[in-house]
Amino acid sequence: MRRPGLAVLALTGAAFLFGLTFVVVKDAVAEFPPLAFVGWRFAIGAVVLALLAPPRGVRLWRDGTIAGSFLFAGFALQTAGLTTTGASNSALITGMYVVLTPLLTAAYLRRWPAPWVVVGSVLAFIGLALLTLRGPLRVGAGDLLTFGCAVAFALHIVVLARLAPRHPVVPFTVVQLLVTAVAGLALSIPFEGMPVPPRSVWPALALTGVAVSALAFLLQVWAQTQVGPGRTAVVLALEPAFGVAGAALILGERLTFAGWSGAALILVAIYVVVTKGQEAPVLEAEAVTAAH
C-alpha cells in the first residue's frame, strides 16, 4: 500500500534537515577540510544505521554501491566547483537537478515527462534562481563542475526510484552512506592528508552524521518507494528555503524581496506537482510501458 501523502511529508522533513546543514557546516568547514568532513560525517551516519540493520547480500551491495556512487559524485563535484565559483552560482546551478530529474526520468522511460511535473520543475528552478542569484551568471570551470554535480544529484534520484523498491530501506541506505564515506576519506588522503577531526568539529559531525546523513537520507530513500522522482526533486527544492530560514534565525541573515519571491515560487511548485501531478514511481511506469 503506497502512502504518497506521508512520503511528501517525509521528503519535506528531509529537505528541512538538508537545509539546516548549511548553517551547521558553515563554521565547521572553515577549520576542517571539506572532503574529510564529508567522509567522517557519512561514516557516522552509516555506523548508526548499520547498528539497526546491517546490509547483507550481493545484490544489495551492488545496487547500493551504484546509488552511492552518484551520491558521492554530487558532493565531490559540488565541493570541487566551490573552489573556483561563488556560493550563489553554486546554489543556482546545483538547483538545476529540479529541472534535470524529470527530464532524465523521461529519457530513461523514453516518453515525455508529465506536464505538471515540467511546470513544477520550471517554477522551482525560477524560484531557486531568485533565491540564490546575486549577479550575472558567468560560466567558468567551477560552474561546469557544479553543473556535473546537478546531473549527479538528478541521476541519484532517478537511480533511487529504480533500485530502492528492491531492498529494505535501512540497509540499502547504509551501503550508500558507506560508499560516500569511503570515497570521501580516500580522496582526502592525497588532497587533504585525511586529518583527524578536532574536538570543536565533532558536534557538527555528530549532528550532520546522525540527523542528516542517516535520518534525512533514510527518509528520502523510503519516500522514493512511494512517489516518483519528479515529485521528489521538486519537494527537495525546499532545501534552500529552509537553509535561508535557518540562516535568518541563527546567523541573522536576511532575504531580499527577490529571495522571498523565490521561496514563494518553490512552495507554489511543490503545490502544483503534489496536487496536480500523477507521476508513478519508475518501476511502476516501466511495468505499464511493458504491458503496452
Image (spheres, rainbow, N blue to C red):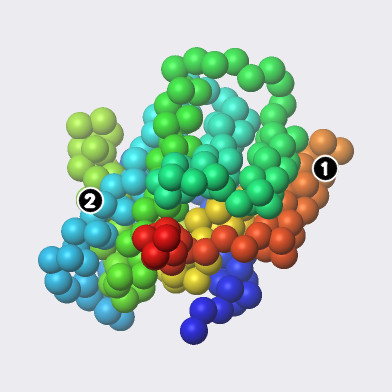
Using residue 142 as the reference point, say whether residue 188 is left or right of it.
left
Would residue 119 be seen by someone viewing this image from the given angle? yes
Q: How many marks?
A: 2
Residue 138, x across and y down, in percent: 59, 15
Q: Which residue matches tag 2?
A: 182
Q: Residue furthest left?
A: 58
Amino acid beneath label 2: Val
Label 1 belongs to which residue? Answer: 261
Q: Is residue 204 above or below residue 22?
A: below
Of marks 2 and 1, which one's residue comes earlier in the chain?
Answer: 2
Question: Residue 96 appears in which quarter of the rendering?
Answer: top right
Work out how far the residue at label 2 is from the one at label 1, CA to CA, in angstroms. Answer: 40 Å
- Residue 133 percent coordinates (x, y): 69, 29
* Element type where label 2 sits in the image: helix
Q: Nearer the viewer, residue 246 or 261?
A: 261
Q: Position of residue 226 (x, y in %)?
A: 50, 71
Q: Residue placed at 72% from the left, 26% from the top?
A: 134
- Dot 1 falls on a residue whose secondary structure is helix
